[in-house]
Amino acid sequence: MPFPREQLETVVNEKLCKIETIKLRNKYIGQACQLFYRSDPLKIVRGQGQYMYDEQGTRYLDCINNVAHVGHCHPKVVTAGSLQMATISTNNRFLHDELVQCAKTLTSKLPSLLSVCFFVNSGSEANDLALRLARNYTKRQDVITLDHAYHGHLTSVMEISPYKFNQPGGDPKPDYVHVAPCPDVYGGLYKDKDYQCSDMAEIYSIPIRGICERLKLQGKGVAAFIAESLQSCGGQIIPPAGYFKKVFEAIRSVGGVCIMDEVQVGFGRVGSHYWGFELQDVVPDIVTVAKPMGNGHPVGAVITTPEIANAFYNTGVTYFNTYGGNPVSCAIANAVMRVIDEECLQENARLVGDYLLKQCRELKYEFDIVGDVRGVGLFIGIELVKQRDSRDAATQFAHWVVNRMKEMHKILVSSDGPNDNVVKLKPPMCFSQENADEFLLAFRECLSMLKKQREGDNLPATNAAAITTTTNSSMELLSNKKQIFERRDHLIKSV
Ligand SMILES: Cc1ncc(COP(=O)(O)O)c(C=O)c1O
């Protein structure tokens, strides 16, 4: 690696004390910018594999960073990026091998119909371009999206993101956007408990057919249907088997195209397959990718059919994106895809994911608050409820768990879903069974606390200082945990 140790240490060393960093952030950064753990934010100064370290060297087990797909600062990715950076970084109006190799590898992972790539810098840009391609190809404007979906922060994709526009201050939904229910069989509009022995895929596809028929009658038709293969912002939703087949059929019957957003879930995360949509045995017309593709570096892509790409070409308006497809981004994406294969990370996601899912499901027998556990590979959601029968969201408890996991156990998890009561796990793909056990031990401690609280005890504050108020048994649990999982890797060893 080209980095001398001293250089690394300056990078790693804190330049400002945390209070100063907070002060400057409050002064110069828009308050609308999201910050994890706002009341006591984390200052992360370095990462390695599935771990992140704060300015004091405290190690956090990272269960939320699906972007650091092959592990934070993976040496092969860092090397590929820095070598290319030191060689040439220019735009894609020049020929470059990394660009064409990246397109070749990416398309080799996809169904053969999806053979043309456009490179962009982010998931938002990818979805924006996907919409342009679809609208140009169909010569229509109307788009069907799913409730609670998030497809990015650009104006065009905010319009198809109910997750954002349904917030109190959100812009109104345009008339050409149509929202269908999110296929959440546990907490969604149609719950499996109310439709026993029914085909939930059929039930959730009926509203889509309804929208298609209505738009056809109005003479508008449909430009596109867009969805995440597994909806992450909706609360780690696994659509019922056969759902996308029915939806794609409905969309195509009125001439629309189907866009699958793989920005969060692609690149082997689901374990059994490289892409989430493959779980449902469908072939989309357009696929969008980003986040994990660059392992933290901004790179994304839109992959489509030659027919859709040619229609875009035939407009005569050329596509140019200054940074999309630059050699550095492509070298990094190539390294990421190589590492996934070399280190069998898709298989790791399958094995560790299966184990974690099974163990999380066991928790349902012990803790009533665990309403549903769902997932595939290293994409898992644990829905906390006040009551199993009503499935009412235990939102405050979910927040308490997220904070306690951070403060007490130094494990980063997040909560999401329409009621913010789903504890989400989407760790780097190098997450091991030992990491899964570390998570499970800590999570069990949190659930035990909640159980005691429901039986009349007070909940302790989430912070570490409150450890004195924990029970003897949880103290034992924690000291065992410390012995089992304590690490002393305070230096970056990977570079
Ligand atoms: C499913 C999905 N699509 C698109 C985006 C937007 O990606 P980016 O933040 O890279 O623009 C996100 C970001 O969270 C996402 O989760």
Image (tube, rainbow, N blue to C red):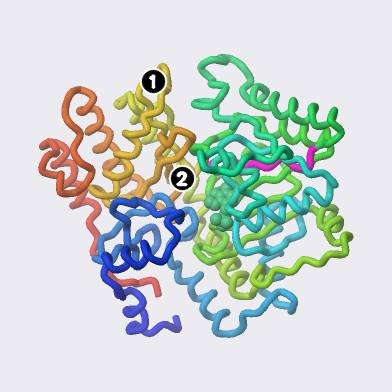
Q: Which residue is mark 2?
A: 351
Q: Is residue 383 left or right of residue 200?
A: left
Q: Is residue 267 visible?
A: no
Rendered location of residue 464, percent (x, y): 18, 49
Q: Is residue 132 left or right of residue 492?
A: right
Give, as a single range, the part of the protein colored magenta: 222-232
Which numbered dot is residue 388? 1
Indicate which label's residue lies in the foreground, 2 or 1.
Answer: 1
Question: What's the amino acid at mark 1?
Answer: Arg
Q: Is residue 237 above or below residue 467?
A: above
Q: Nearer the viewer, residue 192 or 313?
A: 313
Q: Nearer the viewer, residue 203 or 416?
A: 416
Q: Is residue 379 visible?
A: yes
Determine the image quadrant of residue 214. top right
Question: Residue at coordinates 86% horizontally, 58% vertically from top-left?
Answer: 310
Q: Nearer the viewer, residue 108 or 371?
A: 371
Question: Residue at coordinates 14% horizontally, 44% vertically from top-left?
Answer: 467
Question: Residue at coordinates 34% horizontally, 39% vertically from top-left?
Answer: 399
Question: Where the C terminus falls, by quadrant?
Answer: bottom left
